[in-house]
Image: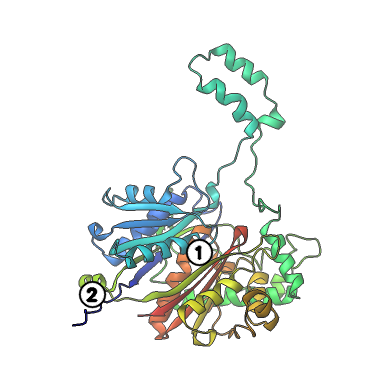
Amino acid sequence: MAKKTEKKRRAVIVGGVRTPFVRAFAEFIKMDAIDLGVAAVQGLLEQTQIPWNEVEGLYWGTVILPSGAPNVGREIALDIGLPPTTESMTVTRACASGLQAITSAVETIERGYADVMIAGGSDSTSNAELKLPQSLVHKAAPVAMSSKSGPMDYLKMLKSLSIKNDMLPRKPEIAERSTGQVMGEAAEEMAQRHSISREAQDEYAVTSHHRAAEAIASGRFKSEVLTVKTPSGKKVYADTIVRGDTSVKKMAKIRPAFARKGTVTAGNASTLTDGASAVLLMTEEKAKELGFKPLAAFKSWAYVGVDPADQLLLGPAIAMPKALDRAGLTLDDMDFVDIHEAFAAQVLAVVKMVESDAFAQERLGRTKAVGKIDRDKLNVHGGSVPLGHPFGATGARMVTTMANELAFSGKKHALLGICAAGGLAAGAVLEAV
């Protein structure tokens, strides 16, 4: 007699929320990545009404890690008051950190190691730590850490310090360690290589702003965006970067940011942002048991790396096709395509590569292009240019918005793509449940 086939476990997304995304050094200036994560997870727990003792793990993505408490996920779980037995960790994969946290939680559930997980990410550029020169550490640490050090030892050490070389803080590095190139320069390079004009970038950015503004005005983000009370008592209830009244004419007045005659500007690029996003995942059986209606599930995902010296941000053009192949689907099967907008130039370049026969042959081992991306399906509610980009939170924002969009629209599939520092990238396919 044949054995009964056991049904494969599937993790489903049953809810997702985020804080408003705000410009760095503004409303959330006194909230670090842990505080913002607490706000997002607390809001998720309250909105979903999931019994806290059901949550078995919390996986979190953060890029700017606080040196005093680098396991941000664990600190969030403890600060909220989740049971101390709640397994929790922090992952960092640059701008794909939030998505990595989520897919890691999906794997944990589908392997049978947990039934209910929370995953997401947060970042606070406002609270990035300024680094003191390492020479100061080398001179001061031996004295400070020695039990035999006395006043004269400290005085001698202080006299040896140079204000310029030893005492002035260093600003956080934003350049690629391997190439010295900053991401905006990489976007300029892609714009030139793929003949993407300033006007095309500005037009794309304006469209994204308008779509985000329409989503906010229509209430589309109402269930996703929390009201957050800051330490000063101010309530922040909406994204603050979106400009529904912007235009190509206004964009054209903004100066290039990375090259004197360049095309990438502060207007057609994402800005430094503070925020957090979180999603609730569980098995289909647990969702039924607890009375949750699943929104979507992951059909597939793919993480890739490319040479940072050769189009740092092209990764989604490789990761998205790989995710489609793993899902057994094509671009034509996708109802929505959501690509992280680090820069308008990068999105437009990735779209060109996905639609290019030459790129398919040279980089993907295909005979023809992956397909055409319908612009009406691309970033339908705007993206990181108008909404902002708290590095670790963007992946969870995209997953939440696309999961809700599939549920609201009755459509079937959404394709996600994220570029990341270091020549990393991610792609994922969501399917409605």
| Residue 187 or residue 362, whichever sits in front | 362
Image spot of residue 185 (x, y percent): 72, 60
Work out which residue is located at the far right of the displayed protein and give it.
261
Q: Mark 2 belongs to which amino acid?
A: Lys
| Residue 236 or residue 196, whichever sits in front | 196
* Residue shown at 45% from the left, 74% from the top: 300
- Name the residue carrying label 1: 394
Q: Nearer the viewer, mark 2 or mark 1?
A: 2
| Residue 287 or residue 400, whichever sits in front | 287
Determine the secondary structure under disc 1: helix
Determine the secondary structure under disc 2: helix
Relative to 330, say whether 70 is above or below.
Answer: above
What number is the disc on residue 288?
2
The 10 Å Cα crowd at callout 1, few under 14, some 14 to 19, many 20 or more, is: many
* Residue shown at 60% from the left, 83% from the top: 370
Image spot of residue 361 (x, y percent): 67, 80
Whether residue 67 can be seen here: yes
Q: Is residue 136 left or right of residue 379?
A: right
| Residue 4 or residue 414, whichever sits in front | 4
Image spot of residue 278 (x, y percent): 40, 62
